[in-house]
Image: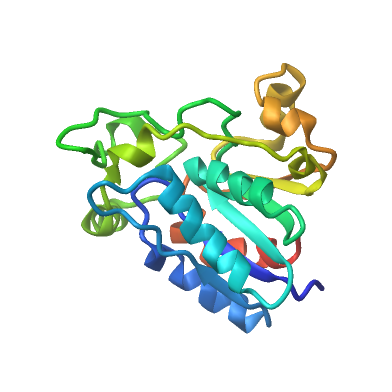
Amino acid sequence: MSADKIVLVGGLWLPARAWSDVVAALAELGRDAEAVTLPVGPGTTLDDQTAAVLAVVDAAPGATVVVGHSAASSLAWLAADARPERVSRVAMIGGFPRADGETYAEFFPIDGGVMAFPGWEPFEGADAADLDAPARAAFESVAEPVPEGVARGVVRLTDERRYDVPVSLVCPEFTPEQAREWLDAGELPELARAKSVDLVDIDSGHWPMLTRPAELARLIAEL
C-alpha cells in the first residue's frame, strides 16, 4: 500500500470539515489524509484556492494523492499540472477537469459577488437520492458560498507532464460505463489525453463523503 499523503479537496460549497468522517476512516486504515481549507472570503480567486491546495502538497514529506470532488476535480488537476513530480495520482469524485481556458465553475447565478448554494431542485434525482431531510439540512447549514473570482476563474494548464499522472475517476451518481462513453465520445478532453485512467464505481449520490464515508475511504486507500 502506498504511503503517499492523501490531500482531499471539496467541491462547490463544501467546507473542509465535510471530509471529517473520511479522514477518520483513512486514519483507521493507516493513511495520512488532510482536507484542504479553501479560502472563500471576498475577493478570493481561483488562483488563491489553487495555492491552498499546493501548500498542502508542498508541505507533505513525499508524494501525494490529490482527491478532488465534483468541480474541484479541476483543482486537483491544476495541482498535478503545477506539481507533476509531487502528485503521484489524482482521484476525481463525480467530476471532470476543465480544459485550459475554460471557466472553473460558473454553473449557477452569481449575486453580490458569490455563487450561493441554489437549493436542492437542480440536484433532485441520482445526485441527492441518498441524502435524507436531516442530511440536506446539515449540508445547507455548512454550505459556503463560492466567491465570484473562483466560479468565474479561468483554468490555466501549462505542463503536459500532467498527462503522465495516473487518474482514478470515481463514479458515484453515474456509472463507469457512462463515463467510458463520455471518454470515447471526446466529451472529456483532458482525461482523454491522460495516459492512465481507471474508472471506479461507488454506489452513492453526488456526495459520498457525507453518505458513504467509510466506503469512500476504503476506495481511496486502495487506489
Residues 178 and 51: in front is 51
Residues 70 and 200: in front is 70
5 with respect to 140 (left or right): right
The N terminus: image quadrant: bottom right
Q: Which residue lies at the image location 54% right of the left edge and 25% below the top edge?
A: 101
Res 112 → quadrant: top left
Identify the residue at the far left of this view. 112
Q: Which residue lies at the image location 51% right of the left edge and 25% below the top edge?
A: 102
Residues 11 and 162: in front is 162
Q: Is residue 157 above or below residue 69?
A: above
- The image position of residue 118, as x and y in percent, is 25, 36
Q: Is residue 205 visible?
A: no
Identify the residue at the far top of this view. 185
- The image position of residue 43, as x and y in percent, is 26, 46
Q: Is residue 39 visible?
A: yes
Q: Is residue 75 above or below residue 112?
A: below
Q: Which residue lies at the image location 59% right of the left edge and 29% below the top edge?
A: 100
- The image position of residue 84, as x and y in percent, is 74, 52
The C terminus: image quadrant: bottom right
81 with respect to 101 (left or right): right
173 with respect to 195 (left or right): left
11 with respect to 133 (left or right): right
